[in-house]
Amino acid sequence: MDALQFLNSRRSVRHFKPGRIPRPVIERLLKTACQAPSAHNRQPWRFLVLEEMQAKAQLVEAMQSGFKRDLEEDGLEPQEIEQRLSRSRDRIMSASAAVVLCMDPLVMDAYPDETRQTAERLMAVQSTALAGGTLLLAAHAEELGAVWICAPLFAQEAVREAFELPDSWEPQALVLIGYPAQLPEPRLRRPLDEVVRYR
């Protein structure tokens, strides 16, 4: 498989086989993720790696109280709420590793004006996301499955407190990694003429 075929063959895997990922493999994934480009080379990404069932259950508990409250406020029926909570819980618990991708904005520049400070924060977000995307590709290269989940964005303080993370670590995403139980079919992508302009 050439490089472009490899990139195009990555899928978001949500169902995993049982099995622990060896620590050296996890470390290879993280070292590769840290090769992502970042604004000013500040490398604002931080990783919380959860391998133990108890730790993953702690993450589920930290995120789900707020998730349940939001679904109730959205007016969903109790049965639908429980189905969504259960699906999320099962997905996290079945992964061999759950990586909470965090951002540390303190390593970025500080500006006196709001415009530049807002742009600087966005650069930190973009840099952290690039590390997360590279982590997904690294997992694919190791023949592992992985999926990006945004849930920690809605429970940043709860996740930070549950794991006693530094105050400056801002949870941005959750990357679930494991041995794929099944490879999803490719999902449709928008045609280039919808998303590209040439001049």
Image (spheres, grey):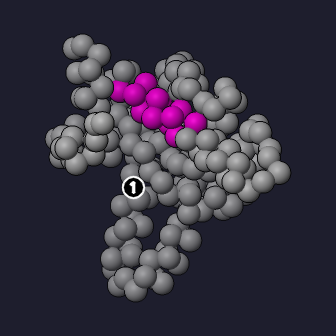
Observer-nearest residue: 56 or 80? 80
Q: Which residues are magenta?
A: 127-140
Q: Give the quarter of the figure containing the N terminus.
A: top left
> Within the image, what quadrant is residue 137 found in?
top left
Observer-nearest residue: 196 or 134? 196
* Residue 132 is one of the magenta-drawn residues: yes
Relative placement, left or right, of 13 versus 130 is: left
> Within the image, what quadrant is residue 43 found in?
top right
* Residue 13 is one of the magenta-drawn residues: no
Q: Residue at x 56, y 58 (%)?
A: 153
**Amino acid under disc 1:** Asp
Q: Residue at x 50, y 24 (%)?
A: 29
Number of marks in picture: 1
Q: Is residue 181 among the parts visible in the rendering?
A: no
Q: Is residue 12 among the parts visible in the rendering?
A: yes
Question: Where in the figure is residue 75, as x and y percent of width and height?
Answer: 40, 86
Question: Where in the figure is residue 164, as x and y percent of width and height?
Answer: 75, 50
- Residue under circle 1? 90
In the picture as drawn, the residue positioned furthest to the front comes out as 199
Observer-nearest residue: 71 or 153? 153
Observer-nearest residue: 82 or 104? 104
Count residues near mark 1 (Cα–Cα under 10 Å), then give few for <14, some for 14-19, many for 20+.
Answer: some
Question: Where in the figure is residue 154, as x and y percent of width and height?
Answer: 56, 63
Q: What secondary structure is the stretch in magenta mostly built from?
A: helix
